Amino acid sequence: MNILETVGGGVNRGLAYVGGLTIQFWSALRASPRVLPVIGRRGRWREALRQMSVVGVNALPMVGIMSVCTGFILAMQAGAELRRFGALQYVMDTVAIGFTRELGPLLTAFVVSGRSGSAFSAEIGTMVVTSEIDALRTMALDPIEFVLAPRCLAAMIVIPCLSVMSNAFGILAGAAFMHMETNLRLSMYLQYVADSIYLRDVLTGVLKSLVFAAIIVNVGCREGFRVHGGPDAVGRAATSAVVWSTFLVILADVFFTAIFYLLHWH
Amino acid sequence: MTNPIISVEDLTVVYGGRRVLDSVSLDIQPGEVLALLGGSGSGKTTILRHIIGLERPYSGTVRIRGIDINRCSPKELKAIRRTLGVAFQECALFNSLSIEENVALPLRELTGLADPVIEIMTYMKLAAVGLGDAGKRLPTELSGGMKKRAAVARATALDPEILVFDEPSAGLDPIVAAGMDELILLLKRAFHMTILVVTHELASAFRVADRMAMLHQGSLIAVGTQDAFRASTHPRIRQFLDRVPDPIAQSAAVDHRFRELAGMTGATQ
């Protein structure tokens, strides 16, 4: 009975958390037109642009290096096995499909959650501690619209872009491996990759990365908004932002991959 | 007597089973400066947070110009908030924006004024608090007193009817704190604002206030003019005015623990 209670309580809290996130995400989506240039409130898009640079452009070197390394690792591991069957060319398929469908979005999500998810929660948590969020509310400005919406819009634009870049880096690492092993020319390699992946593979990856972006930005901001107390609470919020967003990204990944699998989108 | 601009009725607040405010009623008249006094933990910040609508009460009502801020439409609440300026204890300036941008923010977001007009108004607000030449600086580059002044400039950006100060002189040296008092008086005289000052600084309260109210352990124990306050015989008010410390609590439990630590529990039983 006790175990049942513990597990049930945990599941309940988890569901409540995801429910809260969904509501918050919905408010952010409703507020996001006001962040857009021309139709939005004047000057608000500047904050979104700044966030795009912080979340996206500044993460590019890290995403690039991690993708190249992972691409190379994948190629080596697959190559070692496939060589035994004389099927070394399938390394190219493995890397191309592995990255576009799975690794590109996932690696990007991990990098961004570590870099920016924690930064969102720390930044907003500090704003809570120093009454800045209260100040916004007393000025009749909605913190969701003012703080979350620009970050949400920025993340949902740059994270899919980053994961496409990650795909490119991973696939290029595969090219380097094939060149070293079989002296394959880059143009030949790219031709082969272009033949082996479908647009569908790339699109499902981009769709996933959109979901990951929504998770990372909303978990980060939610943990920040929930800060209560002093500076130590800000530190805890940053930690739990990374833990929760990583966990939810993996859960979402399983869920969407299963759906794509059942729909035969592969 | 005219209708009060802020009217708090039977406000009760309970946090985790503890009564932080116990049916507090308080009226603030238009154009007056009311100082809300009280020691640490007396509930004065809690009452402030309820007056500015940041928290919902357990029971009781808060009315601003006759409108119950916890039962009105979001549109009405927004309209009320536009006429209410708050200078927080921590200043609450946005750290990523310059002082100028901080003051311009409510103007930019809540009015349709053109940029040059906003620029002029921002400069006027900053000049009024003596920060005319510090507009381009970031909040982190300012001293404590300058930050407080910048917070006042932002709170007055929309020319509010009501201005609320949370501990305006906390953490300031006496000279800078006196400067804050003069600023409060200037705002009252020049703009006829209704001002609520939450503070524990007696000197400051006596300098600025028309009326004073005192909170003790969540209850309002006195509301009146400065003279009535000075003449009060209420023991807690006397203690506050005469700066008499509470005796350090000596409970039986503390005594028992000391005996335990000294290994004397056996001997006494």
Image (tube, coloured by chain):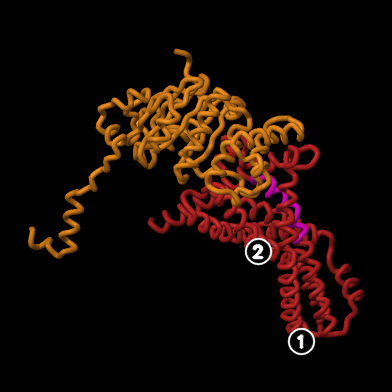
Chain orange in the figure, letter: B
Name the residue at 16% across, 55% down: B256
Residue A49 seen anywhere in this rendered image of the structure? yes
Which residue corresponds to the image point at 54% horizontal and 24% vertical from the top-left?
Answer: B189
Magenta extent = A147-162
Q: Position of residue A87 (x, y in %)?
A: 81, 81
Q: Residues within 10 Å of mark 1 (few under 14, many from 20)?
A: few
**Residue B147 horizontal/vertical position (percent):** 56, 44
Magenta part, dominant SS: helix
Q: Return the residue nearer the eye: A166 or A144.
A: A144
Question: Looking at the picture, how far across and down is residue A171, in whole percent?
Answer: 80, 71
Q: Residue furthest bottom?
A: A84
Pair 2/1: label in front: 2
Q: Chain of mark 1?
A: A
Quadrant of the image containing the C terminus of chain A: bottom right
Residue A249, image quadrant: bottom right
Secondary structure of the residue carrying tag 1 is helix
Which residue is identified by label 2? A110
* x, y percent for residue A75: 76, 78
User: Does A116 sit above or below residue B75?
Assistant: below
The chain letter corresponding to red is A
Q: Residues within 10 Å of mark 2 (few under 14, many from 20)?
A: many
The subunit carrying tag 2 is A
Q: Which residue is mark 1?
A: A84
Q: Hey, what amino acid is under mark 2?
A: Phe
Above or below, A223 against A74 in this view is above
Query: A96 and A73: which one is in front?
Result: A73
| Left or right: B65 as drawn, with respect to A182 | left
Q: Residue at the top extreme?
A: B1
Residue toward you, A72 or B43: B43
